[in-house]
Image: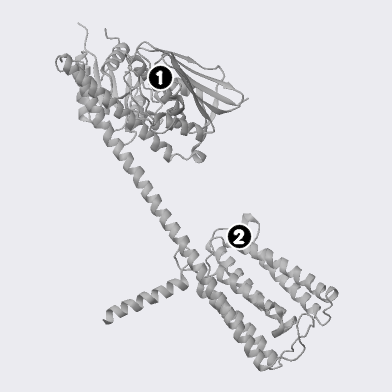
Amino acid sequence: MEQKKVILIIDDDPDIRSALRVMLESAGFVVGEAANGEEGLKAVQRIQPDAVIIDLMMENVDSGSQVAIKLKEDKYPGPMYMLSSAGYAVRYNIDARELGLAGIFQKPVDPKVLISTLKAKLGVA
Amino acid sequence: MSSSSGKYSQSLLSKIIRFFLRDEEGSFPIFLHSLRLEDQLYDFTIIRFCVAVLIVIGSFFAKYILGIYQLNHYALILLAIILFLANTINFIIAFPSRRKRSKSSTYRFLLVFILHLSIATDFLFLTIAIWLVGGVYSPFQTFFIFHVIIASILFSPLIAFAYTIYGYLLFLTLAILIWLQWLPQMYPMGAVPSNNPPTGTYIITVAVVQGLLFFLTASLTTHLMYFLREGQRQIVRINRDLERLCDQRKGFLQIALHNLRSPISAIAMHLQNLLYGYGGELNETQQAWVQRSLTRIDELVSFLHDLENLSVMENADLLREAKEFELNSLIEKIIKENQDLIASKNHEIKVELPEKKIYVSGIQRLIQEAILNFLTNAIKYTPQNGKIIVRAYTHSSYVRIEVEDNGIGISQEDIPKLFKEFVRLKQQKVEGVDATGSGLGLYIVRQVIESHGGKVFVKSQPGKGSIFGFDLPVIRKK
């Protein structure tokens, strides 16, 4: 039996985390949560997720980018996705390529799009 | 009682002090009102050079053309030369090469000192000139009034009155010295009406009349200047208040937007989970209600997005922030970042970009928003499995960016309304299209593009699709 893929959600909004958890668990993913950038970086070390979803705006403006930069520096091997409110990625000039992101999801995230994107990236049937 | 009268006298005293001493910035005046001290001193120095030349020309003209033979034009020429030389020294000291000029308080103090010295010597030179051209009979006495007006315009009321008293004392001294015959009364006949020595009564009359003229002029001009400065101060104060209020409003908008966005996203995502049956299967009615709620939330999200853009545009300073950037990779980036939205409606997207990179100048994030707006509209207003083409090409000195779709299109009568503020068009019911806008998106695009020296356009046919686009001045690169 194929081992379930682990997704880490780094977002300071518990409701967003719980909504994403429901979406991802329904698609057969195992979900880990972190409420801020610092916790997120520790959680990556601890649970070694297959993919990370990071909220752009957490305790500080742009703090999601900082997490992505740190993970890229630490040579995190999995795909990283940014969660952004509509237009925020534009406003803060987020360069997905530069940050090593696999993509940006606009909030509110469409479950169908989220799941199909992650499954395709992680090679889940 | 005594305290209230004390209060009143204190307030009256402070009013008097403020009236006499306050300058434009409301701080201690140091002597000068001028905020443009350097420019004003420069102008006065140039005028003074002209006056020296005019004295020479005038004295020759008076003697040899008008025939005023008694005029001591050598003395006048000597006076003009001294004025010219003194002014030259002032000019050299006050205006060294631009490189050496500084904003330091020492330099400012030097300028203030030279200005005061110039005005004080002007009064003195004028008194001598008046003595040479007829003393108490001289028609040039009125030039004193001109100097009083200049002092009243330039300085605080206290200093202006000090100069008025100084000027008047000079004139009075001249009149008394002539009356006492300690100074000879000049009679350049033609310039003065009589060669009779002035009587005591005449001297007193001239002294009183001139005194009244001096002080009335100073009083009126300083009052006028006071009201002008008071008005200016009020404008500055109101402007500061308005700027503060404007900043507060912008700050409030930012906080409100941020605080609204998070809960709305959370609500929408939980509703989506409900709709997809992650919390158990919903019956048809429940599904319809949740779908309806999601549609309304989507409207709210796009309205917040437009408000956000409006606030970004309001805060943008095109002159300061404009930078050169490349469009090809920007368009590719926008499409990549919106793959999820495109995929959600299963649209086919085609990108047609020239091989040669296109460069424009402006605020990248605003141009990005404009392209994004066209793209998201094309996605939203095109039924499932639609076709969207994003293309860019140069024509003459412009780059044209177009987003073409085979969506629901817009009627000819609605097209002129599109780029106006808060315009929401009546939308026909089409399967797979359930979107309404805030009425701000295209208005913002037009504002952005026009502020960058460009122009927006739209071509559309109902049922066939639309092309939304804009032209921007292109930067030619070899």
Answer whether residue A47 is visible to the viewer in this image: no
Query: In which quarter of the view is residue B465 placed?
Result: top left
* Of the pair B454 and B437, the residue shown nearer to us: B437
* Of the pair B473 and B116, the residue shown nearer to us: B473
Q: How is the image coloured?
A: one colour
Does B318 sit left or right of B463 as displayed? right
- Please provide percent x and percent y for residue B250: 36, 43
- Identify the element where label 1 is drawn: helix
Q: Which residue is mark 1?
A: B378
Q: Amino acid at mark 2?
A: Asp
- Please provide percent x and percent y for residue B285: 17, 17
Quadrant occupied by the C terminus of chain B: top right
Quadrant occupied by the N terminus of chain B: bottom left
User: How dense is the environment of label 1, judged by Cα within 10 Å: few (below 14), some, or many (20 and up)?
Assistant: many
Does B26 sit left or right of B129 as displayed? left
Query: In which quarter of the view is residue B166 placed?
Result: bottom right
How many numbered marks, from 0 up? 2
- Identify the element where label 2 is drawn: helix
Which comes before the other along the chain, label 2 or label 1? 2
Does B202 sit left or right of B339 as displayed? right
Give above or below for A55 relative to B19. above
